[in-house]
Each structure stands twice: as C-alpha cells, then as structure tokens.
Image (cartoon, grey):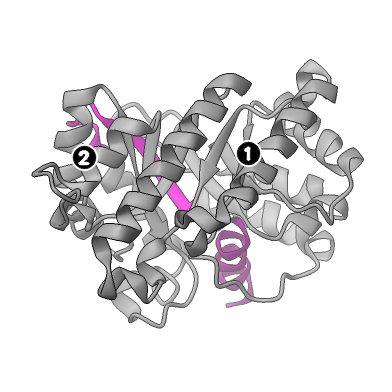
Amino acid sequence: MKTIATPRKFAVLLAALLLCSLLIGPFVHAESGSVSKARTTWLWHTALIQTDSSELLDFAKSQGVGILYLQISTKVDLASYRSFIRQATEMGIEIHALNGAPDWALETSRPKLDAFMTWIRDYQRSAAPEEKLAGIQVDIEPYLLPIWKTDYAALVNQWQNNINQLVAQASDIGLPLSAALPFWLDNYKVPDNEQTLSSWMISKFDSVTLMSYRDSAKAIYDTAKTEFAEGEGMNKKIYTGVETKPSKEGNSITFYEEGIDVLNEQLVLLEQMGGSQSSFGGIAVHDLVGWMDLAHQKLAQ
C-alpha cells in the first residue's frame, strides 16, 4: 500500500490540476448529484505539506474529500502540521494521523506504537482547536511478515494485543481509531476461535477501510460484501478502497491504466451500489499523489 513514486512539484501544476478538476468535475452521488462528503484519501508524502499544502488541499476539496489520512513523520516540523490542518479544517476536510508497518503487529514493536500515540497526544495538547487532528488510522499489514506463514497463531495473538493497546490509547486521547485492512481477512479465523479475523478487527475499530483494490465498481463491491455484513451487525462503517497507482499485482488491481474518467465513472457506480448497505462508509482513494497524477495525465493527453 505504501509503495510510492517520487512526488511531483505540485506548485507548478496547480493551474493545470484545477482546470482538470473543472473538466472532470468532482465525484458526485449518483442519485442526488451532490458532492460526496464521504471521500477519503491517503497522503504518505508528508514532507509535501511543508511546500505544497494549498495545492494538495485544493485538489482534495475539488474531489469532495472529507477525510485525509496523513502519515506522521517526525522529520516534519510541528508548525507545518498546524498550518496544514488549519487550512484543511477551514475547507471542511478532517485530518487523521496515519502510520503503521508490518512489524507493528509484533510485541517487540510496542515502543513504536507507543511513540506514535504519544506524538499524537502531545500534539493535541499543544494545538489550537482548528489545528487538532480529528482521528487516527493504522496500516499494519502483518501478513507481509514471514511469520504469517510459519506461526500464524502467535503472530495474530500479538497483533490482537497491540490493537487492544492502540484502542485503549486512542480512547484516552479522545480520537476515533480506524484501520486499513485487506478485504480477504474473512477467510481467516481468530486463533482458537470460530470468529473471522475480519469480524474481530471490525469490532475493535471505529471504522475500517478495505484495500478492496479492483478496477470496476462491481468487483470492488463484491470483495467487500462479507465485511459489509459484519459491519452492519456491529453498527460500524466500512470504506472501500480503490487504487490509482501502478500495481505489481496486475492491471485489474488499479485504475492507473484506465485513467481518471473511468475512475470517476466507476466510483459513481460504486457509491450507488454501496448505498444499499447501511455499513457503507464511503470510498477511499489511494493515494492523493496518485490521484493527482491521474488528473495530470488527462491534461497531458
């Protein structure tokens, strides 16, 4: 999920991107025609908020983004976070602190989790109301570790313990906690339990974003059906993720080859399909840099 190309200098593309947003239009609800408030996206290039905050946020707003997951980097100064979040707040965009790595599932990595949550707690205490974070998202993905195949039960037990700790800390800070998860966790069970791993995860987080990456609305929707049902029973929201960047897993995973027009068409259809599910939270586009690149590619044609 975090494989990203070197970012463009967005400042020189601002006029072109804003023109493109006018040409393609913001995402809309298929039925009402109103701009969606449920769009979310990720920003892994945290350093960009120091130089290109207006360009990033202007594009995000033009596409109806309501939540932006921003990776926290200690290499970025606090003043830049405050300024970026203040601008986003003025635009009606929530900023959620983002971080994670596969080894965050291991007990030996607990200090990393604690450091992340401590940073958030300290930041919230010093930030003005309009500069505060509105939530937290973790992206852990422990199935990328070798131990997933060699000692699944031990790994999942550690992952569960770390999540329980994160949930408690987020509650103390007073922020909702979400997670990015693969769509196929319903194929796995909690060790020594018949509960699906997806169900357990959904029960712990305030919302879940599925990496349901496919290049058609129907395929994306179909990957999320089980999680929609599990979320409905717990009154939890499930966001469906789409990919805009090149993928080593094949062209069917991403809209990179199809381009921005097809992306927009399929997201309208996905939103219409998801509207039949009470647990459907919205659509998450991975990621903001890739999204802007697709828009730029349209102009370059």
Which residue sits at x=77%, y=20%? 130
The three-letter amino acid code for the residue at tag 2 is Ser
Q: Nearer the viewer, residue 200 or 14?
A: 200
Residue receiving disc 1: 61
Which of the 4 quarters of the picture holds residue 9?
A: bottom right
Q: Specify the segment rendered in magenta.
A: 272-301
Q: Nearer the viewer, residue 214 or 104?
A: 104
Q: Nearer the viewer, residue 20 or 94?
A: 94
Task: Tell me residue 113's x, y (percent).
Answer: 59, 46
Looking at the rendered structure, the secondary structure element under dot 2 is: helix
The three-letter amino acid code for the residue at tag 1 is Lys
Residue receiving disc 2: 199
Task: Tell me residue 35's x, y (percent).
Answer: 47, 32
Task: Tell me residue 37's x, y (percent).
Answer: 48, 30
Q: Is residue 274 magenta?
A: yes
Looking at the rendered structure, the secondary structure element under dot 1 is: helix
